[in-house]
Image (spheres, rainbow, N blue to C red):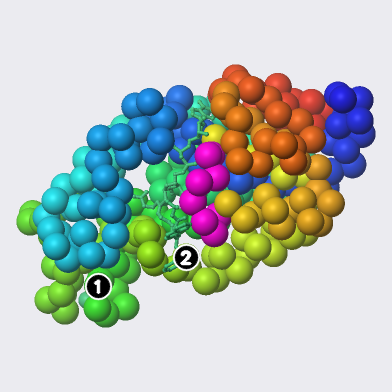
Amino acid sequence: MWDKILDKLQDAKKIVFVTGAGISQESGIPTFRGKDGLWRKYDPMQLATIDAFYDNPKLVWEWYEERRRNILDAKPNPGHLAISELAKYRDVSVLTQNIDGLHQRAGSKNVYELHGSIITIKCTVCSFKDKITTGFLQLPPLCKCGNMLRPDVVWFGETLPQDVWGSAMEKASSCDLMIVVGTSLAVSPANLLPVYAKQNGATMIEVNPEPTAVSQSMDLSLRESAANALPGLIDTISSF
Ligand code: BV8
Ligand code: ZN
């Protein structure tokens, strides 16, 4: 199995990573469905939908403020750093469901945030959008137009940013190696990206201690954590 894969790794020019909460787990950020997962303590439909926001904007803001503080205290781990390292040798793009910005903090450039970013806010009415630099005097914070500000993340039932999604589909459909790291692929349409790559004949690798919905269509499954598996895998790829 390895020798067949090694040839593919040697020839891989355009490499795409699809990542989820699992790659940030070893940075101390809880996953969603894992045993200490966020969705075990909080009902996503009570906190990550536009209706939940308008029902109780203060509660939803408190939850995102708590997560943002935790994320700003976190550091990229060897998994994030290995991906940014590989970009020195190959054409690498990162399609992430994570809103934590840790890929960018690890030095990765071509990062596509499918579900938005917890460090950006936008107005619920006007086109105001900005990076969060300071805490907020009041929750929910108000825009200068007087309307509520909200986290610039994609909530359930909301469409993904079309420019980002368009680029993600293009990258997935034209890559020759896709590495799926730390995601259960339970959420659509992000979970379609491996399908596009497979249809394009890409070599498929997953890094996840647990099997996922696409494990059977993988050419190689590394049942290890991201921080343990990625440095070795990237060394192998970049050694060619
Ligand atoms: C949309 C941002 C068009 C906010 C997020 C019914 C059936 C099917 C689909 C639907 C349905 N009803 C509605 C839908 C569509 C819905 C959907 O897919 N729902 C699911 C729950 C069934 N999708 C949407 O609504 C999307 N929009 O479709 O628009 C539309 C419009 C109207 C109506 C219909 C369609 C928008 C989805 C985006 C939601 N926002 N995040 C926030 O973060 O607060 S989703 C959020 O959850 C994350 O971004 C991520 O996408 C997802 C969590 O998944 P993972 O990241 O994979 O995390 P998880 O915990 O599940 O898994 C972690 C994995 O890591 C595990 O496999 C574990 O084994 C592994 N792991 C753990 N530790 C490690 C590790 N791996 C490596 N190393 C480790 N150390
Ligand atoms: Zn406004």
Tell me the SS state at disc 1.
Answer: loop
**Image quadrant in which the N terminus is located:** top right
Residue 100 % position (x, y): 40, 44
Give the extent of the magenta segment: 183-190
Residue 105 can be seen in this image: no
State the predominant SS element of the stretch in magenta.
loop
Residue 123 is situated, as x and y percent measured from the top left of the image, at 25, 71
Closer to us: 72 or 117: 117
Q: Which mark is residue 124?
A: 1
x, y percentage for residue 40?
Answer: 30, 34
Question: Which mark identifies residue 191?
Answer: none
* Residue 29 in magenta stretch: no
Which secondary structure, mark 2?
A: loop
Q: Is mark 1 within 8 Å of ligand 2?
A: yes
Whereabouts is ligand 2, in terms of quadrant?
bottom left
Query: Is residue 186 a member of the stretch shown in magenta?
Result: yes
What residue do we see at 29% from left, 74% from top? Answer: 128
Residue 160 marker: 2
| Drawn side of residue 223 relative to residue 27, left or right | right
Residue 33 spot, x, y in % from top left = 41, 35
The residue under label 2 is which amino acid type? Leu
Residue 132 higher or lower than 223, as above or below = below
